[in-house]
Amino acid sequence: MDAQLIGELEQRVVSLLDGYASLKQENLRLREENRRMVEEREMLKQRVDAILRKLEEV
């Protein structure tokens, strides 16, 4: 292999590693967003259930 091919391979590996790091960060962000949305959904479900119970009492 000549130096040019090795340099090109190195650039591709660095690019892949950068892409991998970006995807890991995005994955963490999306997991956190998903966790918050699940919590929000649960709170809304509890509120709706409470309202329904009050309506059943009427």
Image (cartoon, rainbow, N blue to C red):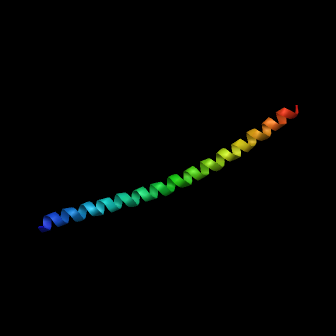
Image location (x, y in percent) of residue 38? 62, 48
Q: Which quadrant holds residue 17?
A: bottom left
Image location (x, y in percent) of residue 47? 75, 42
Q: Is residue 26 left or right of residue 18?
A: right
The N terminus sits in image quarter: bottom left
Q: Spot the residue most to the right.
A: 58
Q: How many discs mark residues in the rendered view? A: 0
Q: Is residue 45 left or right of residue 13?
A: right
Residue at horizontal 35 percent and vertical 61 percent from the top: 18
The C terminus sits in image quarter: top right
Q: Is residue 29 left or right of residue 8?
A: right
Residue at horizontal 68 percent and vertical 46 percent from the top: 42
Please, is residue 27 above or below residue 3 in the view? Answer: above
Q: Spot the residue most to the left.
A: 2
Q: Spot the residue most to the top.
A: 58
Residue at horizontal 55 percent and vertical 51 percent from the top: 33
Residue at horizontal 51 percent and vertical 52 percent from the top: 30
Image location (x, y in percent) of residue 52? 79, 35
Image location (x, y in percent) of residue 15? 30, 59
